[in-house]
Amino acid sequence: MKSKRVFIAINVELSSDLSRVFQELKDELESDRIRWVPENNFHITLRFLGDLQPDQIEIVKLILDEVCSKKRAFVFKLYQVDFFKHRGNPSVLFFNLDRVEDFVCLSGTIQKRLNEKGISSNKKFTPHLTLARLKEIKDLSNFYHVVDKYREIPTQEIKADRVIFYESVLKPSGAEYHVLDEYQLS
């Protein structure tokens, strides 16, 4: 049987205010080489697992069912535009979020259970909502200016009450996400 590239996430739907901010960022950075995440793909990754075999996928489903049934839903806020650097250059543009400890706890519990079953996942976990992957920024001072301009944005409160197990299919046009299963937080 064929393996699938999978990850575990919490889905996010932007408010009209943050959707507008997202569009303004795209407009202001249009001269740069940036791969923007389509709004319907917005999520906060809890664990990226990579390629798993069908039997491993079934184990992950059992773990998620067990973990999510014992974890409470929580509320968090999106509140700021920021970016990660890779080798000194901006690499990922994202919305920051609060209540990081709730994400860290949920992600850590999932990782612990996966490790017990011999399934590895990404080790480092920094909760954020990816907006774009930055391929080439032509004018760094303009980029920094735009990010600073959007440091203070309208906040959006979101209830995290479902965990989604996704398959990620890589295509030249970008990744396509397919829901493998959903799990309700209690």
Image: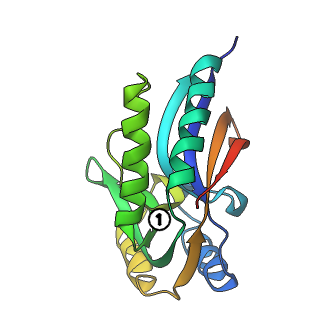
Which residue sits at x=55%, y=81%?
157
Residue 26: give x, y in percent of width and height.
60, 70
Three-letter amino acid code of the residue under disc 1:
Phe
Answer above or below: position of 126 versus 65. Answer: below
Q: Quadrant of residue 2?
A: top right
Give left or right: position of 119 versus 173: left
Image quadrant in which you'd find residue 142: bottom left
Closer to the camera, 73 or 99? 73
User: Which type of secondary structure does the marked residue at label 1 adopt?
Assistant: strand
In the rendered view of the protein, which quadrant contains the N terminus? Answer: top right
Query: Is 146 on the left-hand or right-hand side of 15?
Result: left
**Quarter in which the C terminus is drawn:** bottom right
Query: Residue 114 or 145: which is nearer the viewer?
Result: 114
Q: Residue at x 56, y 32 (%)?
A: 60
What residue did someone put label 1 on?
Answer: 94
Q: Residue at x 72, y 43 (%)?
A: 179
- Does the rendering let one see residue 72? yes
Displayed quadrant of residue 99: bottom left
Q: Is residue 162 above or below residue 109?
A: below
The residue positioned 69% from the left and 63% from the top of the image is: 39
- Above or below for 13 versus 148: above
Q: Position of residue 58 (x, y in %)?
A: 63, 26
Q: Residue furthest top?
A: 1
Locate residue 107, reporting x and y percent: 42, 50
Q: How is the image coloured?
A: rainbow
